[in-house]
Each structure stands twice: as C-alpha cells, then as structure tokens.
Amino acid sequence: MSELKIYPVKENIAANALIDDAGYQKMYEQSVVNPEGFWREHGQILDWIKPYTKVKNTSYDPGHVDIKWFEDGTLNVSANCIDRHLATKGDEVAIIWEGDNPEEDKSLTYNELHKEVCQFANALKAQGVKKGDVVCLYMPMVPEAAIAMLACTRIGAVHSIVFGGFSPEALAGRIIDSNSTIVITSDEGLRGGRAVPLKQNVDQALTNPDTKCIEKVIVLKRTGGDVAWTEGRDLWWHEITENASEQCEPEEMNAEDPLFILYTSGSTGQPKGVLHTTGGYLVYATMTFKYVFDYQPGDVYWCTADVGWITGHSYLVYGPLANGATTILFEGVPNYPSTARMSEVVDKHNVSILYTAPTAIRALMAKGDEATAGTSRNSLRVMGSVGEPINPEAWEWYYRAIGDEKCPIVDTWWQTETGGILITPLPGATALKPGSATRPFFGVQPALVDNEGQIIEGATEGNLVMVDSWPGQMRTVYGDHERFEQTYFSTFKGMYFTGDGARRDEDGYYWITGRVDDVLNVSGHRMGTAEIESALVAHEKIAEAAVVGVPHEIKGQGIYAYVTLNAGEEPTPELHAEVKQWVRKEIGPIATPDVLHWAEALPKTRSGKIMRRILRKIATGDTGSLGDTSTLADPSVVDKLIEEKAKVV
Ligand code: 6R9
C-alpha cells in the first residue's frame, strides 16, 4: 500500500473560501444538535412563495417510514433556478454548451434561458401536459435537455430522464413503470464523433404494446439525420415552440410535490424509480453545491456528468442554476477528438471548478502527458470526484497533472437516493487524504454498523448507514412504498442503509470501500447483477447465468458473467459475440460483459442458492482461499469452474 499522505488546507484557499475548518466544526455541530433550527434557517437559501412553518417531519420506523421536509411551504423550482436571478444577473451566462465538435459551442444568459424555458413550458401545456403528469426525457447533452427539465418544473410536471445510452427495451421499461405521457428526444445524439439513433430507439421502444400511455413524442432537431415519423404522435420541438408565448407563470408547488423520478439499480429485481420532491431536494442541492465547491460569483463550473444520472440533475442543472452560477454542459467525451480535450475545454472556457469521475481520470492518467498537452489549466481552483471510490494513485495524478498541486480535490460520496452529496471535504475546511471522502456534510449523520445492526464506534469498518434524515433524501420508490422500506430500512431497523461499506479512521474520516450488496459500479454506472443475469437468461440458448464484479484498471469494476448453456448448445466464438451483443440490446452498451465464462454448472447450496462468494474468487483467480465448500450440493463444480477459467477469453 502506498504511504498515507495528508494534504493540509492551503492557507490562501482557507482565507478566500466560504468556510474554514472552525466554521465547518461550528456549523456541523449546530446542524446535528438542532436539525430543526439549522434547516429552518438554511431553507432560506431558496425563494419560497408561501414560507414553511414546519421544517422536519421524518420517521425511519419500520412499517411507517415517512419523510417530509418544509411540508407546508410552496415554491417553484424553475423560478428559483431562473427568475430570481433576472434582476441582478439577467445578462450573465447561465449555460455554456460545448459541442462534441470543438468548433461548436454557444451560451445562454439567464434572460435567454428564461425565454426558452417559458416557451417550451407553454408548448408542453398546449400538448395537454398538466401538473403531476410524468414526462420522459431521452435526450443528448444539449441545452434543450436542461430547458426541458426546467420547463417541466415550471408547470409542475414530473420528469423522468432516461440516459441516452440505454437500449429501447430499457427505455420502454421505464416509460411503462412511470406511466409517462410524453417522450422528449432528438433525431440523433452525437458523442465522440458518432451519431446515436435516439429517435429510432424511441420508435422501437414504443412498439411495446404496454407503452400506450405515451400520447406524444417531441423531437428536437440536433443532427438533421433522417428519422421515421408517426403523424399525429410525433412533433418537432422547433415547430411547437416557435409561436409559444415567452411568458409562463410558474406553478405554485408544495414542497412535497414530486419533482422527478430517476431509475437506479439495486441488488434485486428491475431498476427502481427513485422519487425526489420539490422543496427539500432543491434546498439540499443548492446548499451542497455552494459549500462543497466553494462556489463564488464569477466561477465557471463544469460537471462532466450526463443529465441522465443523478449528478447531472443535482450538480449540472439544479444546484448550479439555483445558485445563479455559470454551468457548462458538454456534449462529448473527455478524450475526443484529442486526448487533451478535457484540459482544452478547461482552458477554453476558463473553468474554475471541475467535477468529474474516477473512471475518466484513470483513462486520462493512462495516457500520461498527452492528457494535458498544450494546456495550462490555470483557471482551476477546486476539483471534484464522484461516482466510485477514487484510488489514491488516480487521486494523486488528478491533483498533480490536472490541478498542478494548487486545487483541493473534493471526493464526494453520495447516491441517486440521497439527492445530494453526503460525505465530502470542503475546499477551505478539510485536510485531504487521497482516497477518503472525509467528513459528513451539514445535517448528515453517518454511522457504521456490524452485520447485526449494532452501531460500532471509533476507528473501525462496517456497513454505512444514516441514522437520521436530510432534506435531499428520496421519499419513496415510485409506486411502491413497500419496496422503499424493504430496500433501505429493513436491513438495519430504524436506519437508512446505503448499500456501501466504509472504514472510519482515527480522525473520523470515512473511506468508502464499495458496495456490500450485489450492485456493480462499472465506470461509475450502477448496475444490479440481477438485471444483467435476467438479460442473459432471456437469451434462448442460455439456461442459467451468474454475474460478479472483478477489478478493472480503468472502469473500476468489470463485468464477469458465468453462463450455462441449454443442453445441446455448444459454446462457439459466434455465440460468444452474440451473447455480448444481446446484453447490449437488452440493457445498453454499459452492461456488456467484459468476460464470458462458459460454465458447465454453477456452485449452489443444497437449497439452490448460487454461492457468489466462490464465483467472485474464481473470477479474480483467488482460488487459494475458497473457504468452506462443503455446503455445496456438488463440490466438484468448483474444480470444473477453475479448469474452465483457463479457457476464458
Ligand atoms: C452520485 C452517484 C451511488 C454509488 C454509491 C457508491 C458509489 C459514489 C462515491 C462512491 C466512493 C465516492 N459512489 N460516489 N464511492 N466514493 N466519492 O454516483 O450516484 O449512481 O446512485 O451511485 O456509487 O457505491 O453507493 P449513484
């Protein structure tokens, strides 16, 4: 293991930051001693139409999990992200769009954003979209993605964004589960020089007879590529907005009205619709954005996440815009057309805050100096990381090569479910240890518990839970509150279970060790092993499948799939390619197995449970310590698997 380094807060940074260590200690203390008073005060970070009188009303009690914040207040999200800035910052840039092609970019001021959002909101209304309706977005990374999100919030519609890399089948599943009435998409997307057939995927998704809930498909012209057209259903974005009014009164929403649904993977079953509501979510996204990135007027902020993930919701759109910041929306990928693209974009737009993911950092690190060639990155002040544990080597490289040892790195731990960042350094307050997400944000009360659910104190390792609620917490699984309770509150009664394991050191710093459940994290994308397994067994030649994660140098984790074929089927190279293609089609390219292991049989207990512990060890070649295999129905399966492993390509 590399020597443990500590990077104290630099004096010049602490002096100019919003908050220093003493400030953090004081505010944190207040936030946990008196959460009610703390959030009563800090809820004021937003403009409320009707001020709240109630602040916190939350229960983690088994059978009665109920989470409400600011429940009698009313507000509108788009008014907080746009209208309230117009008087002072109308002509300042809200969104800088950087195209996939480095020659394409544009910016939108807050005034322009206001106009576009109002027009599109009116267009949605004209199509019959009402408060509470669910609108599905399947969009590329263009300003219209943010415009569509904000337009939904303006009229009280609930958006459900599906990442543009998901397959038609995955899209259909999410449309059906959320009962969406409209899909907003574009002719094609553009990433890394390649067109993505978004409209064609929507057409295919809508051939599923259960998607009848969809009444209209709104299509943005992005590339001008050919698309099929269904008269009466399909509408061009530019046609329905061209004569729409530039004024649209924001709908008065209750703090607990639904804001959006976002699907995420868990350890069992199909992805869950995580539901976030209006007031608490926005208070939390706004406040965390401000303090975690030490946002100050004049900053140019760039988050490289796609709007299809929670990071794209909270820290590309809502958090930055609610703070009146300038946020960059990037259509492309960090290494196209040149390896130094990310650094070039930083220089081009004078980015002062950069928020990206370990998988991107590792991919660039592998290219060494090429990743920064010809750039200065002098404008950078704060850098962030999110999505998976960042290994100390990647942290050090990010710090040195990208940040020139000048910028604190905020390693932010959080989840789709948490709405915003829960464990993180603050740039002016926290001494950094590479690989540690460090300390809880205000109002966040993490704890470690053993497998029996007993809280364990001091420097130790265990399951990471939260003992009390924070405003950005998800409220329910859309349409299935029982699943919400079951998934997050039943493992350790009376606590929110994150699904992650963590270590806490003698300074009280948290080190996230990764998922302790059957959830994989591949390039920062969450996937349930169960999801990939069910896609595999849906193939006509496959009898059984088991998926485990294996360490992967760039992606963090790779997907290792054990596949048992039906009797009479032969494992050929053609079938190998076909099965990989099949998973891409069923879920999307991000779920493609890295390794297929043709297994004659899987190791099972006498009650028929697959022993994943053994499969994980065989996949990583750690066969010296397989542990007790005597409970297996047929222990000889193990030797067979080890033998087969030698033939795996
Ligand atoms: C925001 C986001 C959540 C899971 C989470 C954990 C992992 C995220 C991390 C991290 C270590 C960090 N994770 N950030 N692990 N250090 N800084 O990524 O949400 O897609 O729901 O994933 O990602 O395992 O439980 P989501």
Image (cartoon, rainbow, N blue to C red):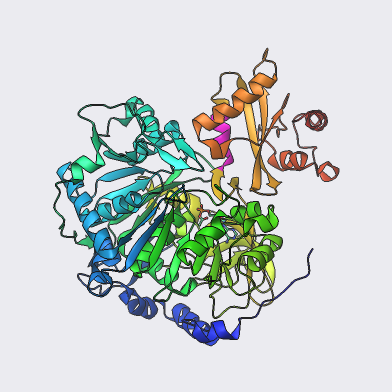
Which of the two residues, 570 or 146, is positioned nearer the viewer here? 146
Whether 456 is drawn above or below 623: the answer is below
Residue 126, position as x, y percentages in the image = 15, 44
Residue 531, position as x, y percentages in the image = 53, 37
Which of the two residues, 561 or 36, is positioned nearer the viewer here? 561
- Residue at x-position 34% and y-position 80%: 41
Quadrant of the image for the N terminus?
A: bottom right
Quadrant of ligand 1: it is bottom right
Which of the two residues, 76 or 189, is positioned nearer the viewer here? 189
- Residue at x-position 34% and y-position 69%: 324
Furthest toward the right, the residue is 624
- Residue at x-position 47% and y-position 60%: 303
Which of the two residues, 47 or 257, is positioned nearer the viewer here? 47
Residue 185, position as x, y percentages in the image = 34, 40
Look at the image and tell me whether residue 493 can be seen. Answer: no
- Residue at x-position 67% and y-position 72%: 433
Q: In the rendered structure, does residue 532 fall within the stretch colored magenta?
A: yes
Whether 254 is drawn above or below 550: the answer is below
Residue 45 appears left or right of 637? left
Q: In the rendered structure, does residue 161 fall within the stretch colored magenta?
A: no
Residue 365 appears left or right of 21? right
Magenta range: 528-536
Look at the image and tell me whether residue 618 can be seen. Answer: yes
Which SS type dominates the magenta stretch? Answer: helix
Residue 275, position as x, y percentages in the image = 37, 52
Marks counted in the figure total 0
Quadrant of the image for the C terminus?
A: top right
